[in-house]
Image (tube, helix red, strand yellow):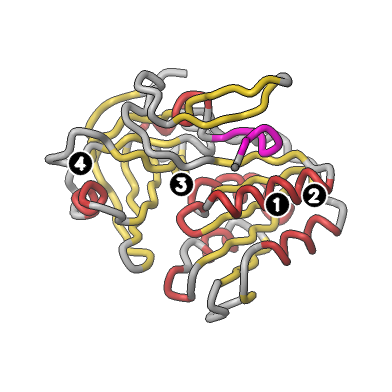
């Protein structure tokens, strides 16, 4: 699949929570190619390496990409200072995304942790009421996109580490409840490694296909520098693959999390 490199106008910017921002760009060619789970590489002025940010949503009719990210350092801080009317320099779309059937059957289970929630929003839009989204956050003031998932028709379950909203604790308990119902056809997950490991194992135990999106530090974003290596067991062999090129989405059953 081809990707595009250019500077595209910012048509919307919203602060979702402390240091978490949502940007909408008008970039028709990239939006037309984008698949759920892919990402972009954003140029931050004054920094050599671009910052990888997951695509939250792609609207092919409007020709827009929505990006949601958290400020975690100087590069993302610089990007977060861009405003509506200015241009964002991106390479997009990159990587391999989630497997989302054209005509979904059964019920999908989305498991997102923190900033891992954005990449799967379009899956919820695809499945609608046949989707349950379990989203975990540190506390009430860190919750993002819960209303977006609900607007997509998904049954949305919120967990917070401190119990300030929703279910207190991790996604483990509601994940088991949903899988025990026996009607889940696919599990999609993105978030911290311990959460991905738990989701993949729970899906495996339930005999359900699972895909996980991995986060890794990246250099080029197109598979040349091999900075973002991960280990999988594929075709009976232990292999080292590139998150940016071979992923970021992998089968949960093949990823070596330890």
- Image point 69% across, 45% down: which residue? 200
**Location of mark 2 (residue):** 184
Which residue is the extreme one toward the left? 46
Q: Mark 2, residues whose alpha carbon is within 10 Å: few (<14), some, or many (≥20)? A: many
Instruction: Tell me the distance, in whole angstroms, between the alpha carbons under discs 2 and 1.
Output: 7 Å
Q: Which residue is mark 4?
A: 44
Q: Which residues are magenta?
A: 249-256
From the top left corner, tell me how far across and down residue 249 is, in percent: 56, 35
User: Which numbered disc flags the more N-terminal residue, 1 or 3?
Assistant: 3
Q: Is residue 20 left or right of residue 115?
A: left
Residue at mark 3: 56
Answer whether residue 253 is magenta in the image. yes
Q: Nearer the viewer, residue 246 or 80?
A: 246
Image point (20%, 41%), residue name = 44
For the residues marked 1 and 4, what is the alpha-carbon distance in whole angstroms? 35 Å
| Number of residues whose C-alpha sits closer than 10 Å to that of mark 4, classed few (under 14), some (14–19) or many (20 or more) | many
Q: Quadrant of residue 151?
A: bottom right
Labels 2 and 4 touching (C-beta < 8 A): no
Mark seen at residue 109: 1
| Sequence-wise first label, 2 or 1 | 1
Mark 1: few, some, or many residues within 10 Å (few <14, many ≥20)?
many
The secondary structure making up most of the magenta span is loop
Q: Find residue 43 and report its horizontal and vertical position in percent.
A: 23, 37
- Tag 1–tag 3 contact (CB < 8 Å): no
Q: Are marks 2 and 1 in contact (CB under 8 Å)?
A: yes
């Amino acid at each position: 699949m081809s990707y595009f490199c250019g500077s595209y106008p910012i048509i919307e910017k919203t602060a979702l929570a402390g240091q978490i921002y949502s940007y909408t760009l008008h970039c028709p060619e990239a939006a037309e190619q984008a698949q759920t789970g892919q990402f972009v590489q954003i140029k931050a002025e004054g920094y050599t390496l671009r910052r990888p940010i997951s695509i939250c949503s792609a609207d092919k009719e409007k020709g827009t990409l929505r990006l949601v990210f958290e400020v975690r350092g100087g590069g993302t801080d610089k990007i977060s200072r861009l405003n509506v009317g200015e241009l964002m320099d991106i390479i997009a779309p990159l990587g391999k995304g989630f497997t989302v059937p054209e005509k979904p059957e059964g019920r999908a289970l989305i498991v997102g942790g923190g900033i891992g929630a954005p990449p799967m929003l379009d899956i919820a839009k695809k499945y609608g009421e046949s989707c349950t989204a379990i989203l975990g956050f540190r506390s009430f003031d860190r919750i993002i996109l819960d209303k977006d998932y609900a607007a997509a028709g998904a049954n949305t379950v919120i967990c917070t580490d401190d119990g300030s909203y929703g279910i207190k604790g991790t996604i483990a308990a509601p994940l088991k409840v949903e899988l025990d119902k026996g009607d889940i056809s696919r599990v999609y997950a993105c978030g911290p490694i311990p959460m991905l490991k738990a989701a993949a194992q729970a899906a495996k135990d339930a005999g359900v296909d699972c895909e996980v999106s991995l986060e890794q530090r990246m250099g080029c974003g197109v598979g040349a520098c091999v900075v973002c290596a991960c280990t999988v067991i594929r075709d009976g062999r232990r292999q080292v693959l590139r998150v940016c090129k071979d992923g970021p989405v992998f089968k949960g059953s093949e990823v070596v999390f330890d």
